[in-house]
Image: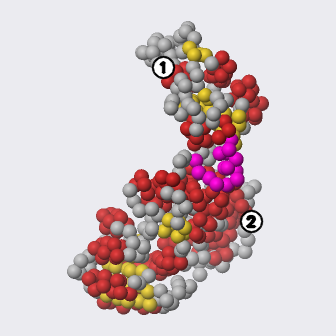
Amino acid sequence: MSSTPIDQTVLVVDSETDFLDWARQQLKASGVRVITETNSANAFKIFCLEKPDLVIAEMHLRPSGGLDLLAKIRAESPNAMVIIMSAYGTTQAVIESMKLGAFDFLRRESLPFTMKVVVDTALKAAAELRSAAPVKPALTVEQYHDDIVGQSEAMQSVFKMVGRVAMSDAPVLVTGESGCGKELVARAIHNYSERNKKPLIAINCAAIPENLLESELFGHEKGSFTGAATQRIGRFEQCNGGTLFLDEIGEMPLPVQSKLLRVLQEGEFSRVGGNATLKSNVRIVAATNRNLEEAITKKEFREDLYYRLNVVGIHLPPLRARSEDIPLLAEYFLSRIAQKQHRPLLQLSGESIKVMQAYPWPGNVRELQNTLQRACVLATNDVLLPKDLPLGQATSASEVIDLSAAPETQGSALTELTVEEAARSLFEALTRENGDRELLPWIEEDFTRRAMELSNNNQVKSSKLLGITRATLRKRLERLGIRGASSSGE
């Protein structure tokens, strides 16, 4: 905590004066101003007067408990940083503390090992929050007429194409990576067309088994196959006069492709097991994340159907290719989340937006939406900082797990990352640094070398760091060709 600014203040509240003396010495050595108090009512008055950067409060206080103090402090200052501690970390106590907005919950017996790390993290967050300039939304959710959002040149081109094709009945093929919003484009085409009073029906061709997809699209007659107890009206009949959106069209089985081609050419079809020829006036908008030209070469997609569907093609760029749209998209999603959850609108700090714009977003807009929803659920402040986002926090393998940290602090440092976040960061680091190697062998060699360096080539200490036996370590060192290692336990 040597980097902690001296002008930060910590209020420690506990009924035991011996503990307060210990905490004062621990925190003063780290360069912060420490205020101590034994009474929760007096502690709240001190908080209102001093506005400390961090409050550390014991669960069991008088005249009211630590949770009551936490609730009062958060009501007075919604962004206040409060750490609750107790000798009994019961499930209810931990859950209630986090529900009320605590920054963390610490067990008393772990304080000699964890307090410095957690306090340093909390003070850093408090400093970031004070200096963060929240970016206010340019629009409210009511001002967005469509769910498809973007001001980049690439998206403006998409909007122009939507406007041009909306008034025609020509089939449209929307291409792009998963999660970039292909269905939203289909809905925009339908909403701005003359068919907007009729239904828009969406079907995921990859989610329906081959033997059921034909019936789903064209319907079936009673008794046409096992289980067909009644006649079924298919989507083409239900959607007459409207728009049928065929998502993941590249996964459509070849037999169903043939029947779809007939509908596009003749405007007619028959139900499964039926003889009657039916007419349907349906506009087709299809979408795929596959390269259909490659699928044609592999005989997995009909070439004639491809040209029938691709009368007008619209390509949606991935989110990483239009990072200038990220602030606008984030504002939109935060507004919608606040509206649906009936909660105050959260804002993003300028640094958070930079972090999001630097991230490659392999899951595209869908991943951005899920990330912000998770951040809103877990947020304890009204401004989202980079630490609140599960992405872009670690940029290399060495930042994910700091093996140079003292053993007593490693557990606390690791709890700041979930397994999912650590794995994602490792994969990103591998892609940047060792793209031609596999992850597990790379981690094994890199971590083994790192452990040997930290232990000055002492095998006993290295094996403890790695969590393996000394015999296993010796075999690994020999296999990896790592030399200069001593087996001494001194």
Question: In the rendering, at what x and y percent does residue 310 appear?
Answer: 71, 32
Mark 1 highlights which residue? Answer: 233
Q: Main secondary structure of the magenta part?
A: helix
Residue at horizontal 55 percent and vertical 61 percent from the top: 138
Residue 117 shows in this picture: no
Q: Kindly identify which numbered label has been placed on residue 481.
A: 2
Which corner quadrant holds the C terminus?
Answer: bottom right
Q: Give the vertical position of 166 relative to 123 (above or below).
A: above
**Identity, as a three-letter code, of the amino acid under mark 1:** Ile
* Magenta range: 148-161
**Identity, as a three-letter code, of the amino acid under mark 2:** Gly
- Asked if the magenta segment contains residue 149, the reply would be yes
Question: In the rendering, at what x and y percent does residue 231 appear?
Answer: 45, 15
Label pair 1/2, CB-CB below 8 angstroms: no
Secondary element at image label 1: loop
For discs 1 and 2, the disc positioned in front in the rendered view = 1
Looking at the image, which is closer to me, 454 or 241?
241
Locate residue 1 relative to residue 38 in the image: left or right.
Answer: right
Looking at the image, which is closer to me, 275 or 140?
140
- Asked if the magenta segment contains residue 168, the reply would be no
Residue at horizontal 53 percent and vertical 70 percent from the top: 134
Residue at horizontal 30 percent and vertical 64 percent from the top: 92
Q: Give the vertical position of 292 relative to 26 (above or below).
A: above
